[in-house]
Image (cartoon, rainbow, N blue to C red):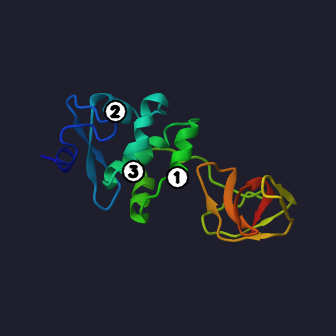
Amino acid sequence: MSEAMIRANGACELCGATESPEAWPVTGGSADAAVLLCATCLSDVAGGEPLSGGRWFCLQESVWSEHAAVQVLSVRLLRRLPGETWAADLLDQVYLEDEVRAWADTATGLDNGPPTVDSNGARLSDGDSVTLIKDLNVKGAGFTAKRGTLVKNIRTGSDPTHIEGRVNKMTIMLKTAFLKKA
């Protein structure tokens, strides 16, 4: 009996359905594993094309599973939900250990989307520093982020047109069109 079968007690680890689940391999990690999936989830997962939203709300729970393989598969599936705001928001909120995130990011045949780049086309990554190239009014905060302000230790997200950084002791979202890599 597989580890997934023992974990899930015969239920799909994504949606919870109990009709004849099968083990699906989650590859790419240091310890490849399997996740137990119902026939409906299995056919969509195996398809490889973008998914449609409503049926996949179950990922809001499975992504928080205590089992790394379930987390990895959930993140990979959330990335296949283009245009679904709730899926993008969930990807921004989910916390994964570094090893699990690397496993989820391994070559899976899924497109991770366009890279985050500054106004000059330089690629931005988590931890980079950027400089503002224009004065920006910060709505709701009552201040203007001045041109030339250095923003250190930025964070990128699922939207390649925005980054997160701290300005005047506040964490704000900044459009990459108004930044250049420092």
SS state under label 3: loop
What's the CA distance linking mark 2 and mark 3? 18 Å
Which residue is more in the foreground, 134 or 10?
10
Nearest to N terminus: mark 2 or mark 3 = 2
- The amino acid type, in three-letter code, at marker 3 is Trp
| Residue neighbourhood size for the residue with mark 1, other residues' Cα within 10 Å, grouped as few (<14), some (14–19), many (≥20) | few
Q: Looking at the image, which residue is at 53% across and 48% down?
A: 112
Q: Quadrant of residue 178?
A: bottom right
What's the CA distance linking mark 1 and mark 3? 11 Å
SS state under label 1: helix
Total labels drawn? 3
The residue that label 1 is drawn on is 93
The residue that label 2 is drawn on is 41
Q: Looking at the image, which residue is at 22% across and 34% down?
A: 21
- Outermost residue on the left side: it is 1
Q: Where is residue 158 in the image (x, y as percent from the top left)?
A: 58, 49
Q: Looking at the image, which residue is at 49% across and 33% down?
A: 50
Which residue is more in the foreground, 4 or 24?
4
The residue mark sitting in front, 2 or 1, is: 1
Nearest to N terminus: mark 2 or mark 1 = 2
- The amino acid type, in three-letter code, at marker 2 is Cys
* Quadrant in which the C terminus appears: bottom right
What's the CA distance linking mark 2 and mark 1? 23 Å
Q: Are marks 1 and 3 in contact (CB under 8 Å)?
A: no
| Residue neighbourhood size for the residue with mark 2, other residues' Cα within 10 Å, grouped as few (<14), some (14–19), many (≥20) | many
Q: Where is residue 87 in the image (x, y as percent from the top left)?
A: 52, 41
Query: Residue 180 vs residue 7: left or right?
Result: right
Q: Looking at the image, which residue is at 34% across and 39% down?
A: 14
Query: Residue 140 vs residue 30: left or right?
Result: right
The residue that label 3 is drawn on is 64
Q: Position of residue 159 (x, y in %)?
A: 63, 48
Q: Where is residue 72 in the image (x, y as percent from the top left)?
A: 38, 51
